[in-house]
Image (cartoon, rainbow, N blue to C red):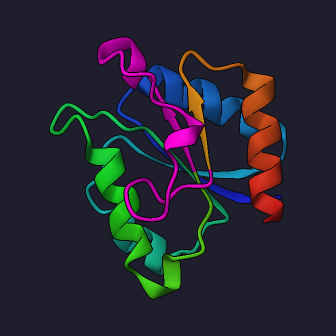
Amino acid sequence: MAKIMIVDDDPDFVDSVSRLLKRKGHELTTFYDTEGVIEQLERDPHDVLILDVMFPENAAAGFHLAQEIRKHEDLSRLPILILSAINTKFPMGFGPGDIDDAWLPVQDFLEKPIDFDVLADKVEALAKH
């Protein structure tokens, strides 16, 4: 069992992913915006962070949060999985090839809509990381 945090502004999506991962035996924490995420992770370490990119307050809030997390020594090794519909809203071909330590310091990327089986497999792999 892994402790998973989901940060996404879509309650229906969070609910669906949470149900899937709970059935797989994982413990879940959810946030609907990026406010307070780092503080929570510092108080209560998690095994994997599932992170959306676009939030109403900032279309790049997920990118910024990932970058801020990497600046915290205690969180620098936390596996981050980006789930985003960014290519639907801003068609720019964004994908796993854009992952790098400076701009997008995450371990993996899935584009929404997602295949829930693929998501579960990626979370399992990252939790073992």
Residue pushed farthest left? 57
How many numbered markers are drawn?
Answer: 0
Q: Nearer the viewer, residue 35 or 71?
A: 71
Residue 111 position, x and y percent, is: 55, 24
Q: Nearer the viewer, residue 90 or 14?
A: 90
In the image, residue 39 above or below residue 27: below
Q: Residue at x 76, y 42 (%)?
A: 122
35 or 103: nearer the eye? 103
**31 over 41 or under it: above or below:** above
Q: Quadrant of the C terminus?
A: bottom right
Q: Residue furthest bottom?
A: 73
User: Is residue 56 left or right of 71 when viewed as pictured?
Assistant: left
Give the left or right position of residue 112, taking residue 8 as reference.
right
Q: Quadrant of residue 9?
A: top left
Residue 125: within the magenta? no
Q: Which residues are magenta?
A: 81-107
Q: Position of residue 61 (x, y in %)?
A: 27, 46
Q: Residue at x 73, y 39 (%)?
A: 21
Residue at the image point whose x is 52% and y is 77% from the top: 76
Asked which quadrant contains residue 103, the reply is: bottom left
